[in-house]
Amino acid sequence: MPFQKAVSKNYSEKALNIFLILLLLITALMLFPGEVQAEADQDYPTDFEEKQGGYHGVFFRAGPEQKMKIALSFDDGPSSNYTPLILDILKEYDIKATFFLLGKQVERHPELARRIDREGHSIGNHSYSHRNFTRLDWETVKKQEIERTGKLIEDLTGQSPELVRPPFGKITEEQIVLLSELGYKVINWSVDTKDWREDNNNPGMLLTRTRLKVHPGAIILMHDGGGDRSHTVEFLPELIEMLQNKGYDLVSVDDMLSLP
Ligand SMILES: [Zn+2]
């Protein structure tokens, strides 16, 4: 084969390979757009990481690193399917956790919100309807999402939560400042179990993923509502035992941040 021809054949093979790889990537994006979007959503809060000093005492992703404490947190409940099972497990291990409740779910299951409070867990405000705060004006966030939910919880437990976790962890800097002026603290997380994923969520994978990321002062994100959380329920006892074996004390977010 003449030299010139061999070279051009080589090039066209390379071009074909690149084309095939691109085609594969595009197909993957078309098949799993939700997954890509969800991953991006979860990464958003790290924008604030470097600025955390600027929000000292107002915005938290974790607690102090000096103590062997970890806080378990559960979002999007209460749900009739999973919240009671999670509460049973926490009771069995004598552990206090933090539940970031949705107002609309509190309306559906007031007895579960009462039970969470009665069993000594912390309750946080996770908005009324789980809309993205960064796409809402401040009045809507304040009145429709935060205060409405706070009132629902206060009517059941006697106390309106001081802790707020914005849906998807998304919030603007301005909203953090405005919430802090009203006396709230904004709590995201430092370890995401990714139990919200619809794939790769079997208990073993959740445990491995979490084990690699835990650290003193970690706030761990899990869910007791918003979808099928049977994996979370199954994984929880293993998670608790793994953390206790590493010497961690499992506490509520208030306890870890030394809030009254
Ligand atoms: Zn949520």
Image (cartoon, rainbow, N blue to C red):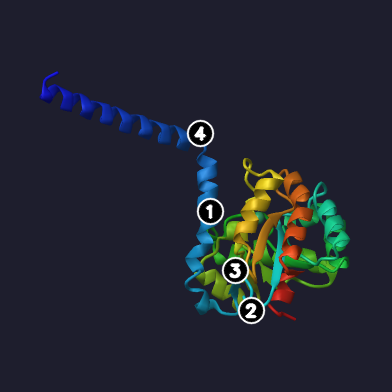
In the rendered picture of this protein, how many numbered marks are placed on residues?
4
Residue, disc 4 = 31
Q: Amino acid at mark 2?
A: Gln
Whichever of callouts 3 and 2 sits on the residue coming sooner in the sequence is: 3
Q: Does residue 67 sit above or below 19 in this rendering?
A: below
Separation of residues labelled 3 and 4 (CA atoms): 32 Å
Res 98 seen here: no
Disc ID at residue 61: 3
Whichever of callouts 2 and 4 sits on the residue coming sooner in the sequence is: 4
Whichever of callouts 1 and 3 sits on the residue coming sooner in the sequence is: 1
Whichever of callouts 1 and 4 sits on the residue coming sooner in the sequence is: 4
Please indicate whether residue 89 sits to the left or right of residue 124 in the image: right
Give the residue at x 79% y 65%. 153
Residue 192: which quarter of the image? Answer: bottom right
Instruction: From the image, state whether disc 3 or disc 2 is nearer to you.
Output: 2
Mark 1 secondary-structure assignment? helix
* Relative depth, front residue between 148 and 127: 127
Instruction: From the image, state whether disc 1 or disc 3 is nearer to you.
Output: 3
Residue 102: which quarter of the image? Answer: bottom right
Q: Which percent across, then down, holds residue 26?
A: 41, 35
Separation of residues labelled 3 and 2 (CA atoms): 15 Å
Instruction: From the image, state whether disc 2 or disc 4 is nearer to you.
Output: 2
Mark 1 surroundings: few (<14), some (14-19) or many (≥20) residues within 10 A = few
Q: Amino acid at mark 1?
A: Asp
Separation of residues labelled 1 and 2 (CA atoms): 29 Å
Residue, disc 2 = 66
Q: Which percent across, then down, holds residue 241?
A: 77, 59
Disc ID at residue 41: 1
Give the residue at x 59% y 68%. 61
The reply to whether discs 1 and 3 touch (Cβ–Cβ < 8 Å) is: no
Separation of residues labelled 1 and 4 (CA atoms): 18 Å
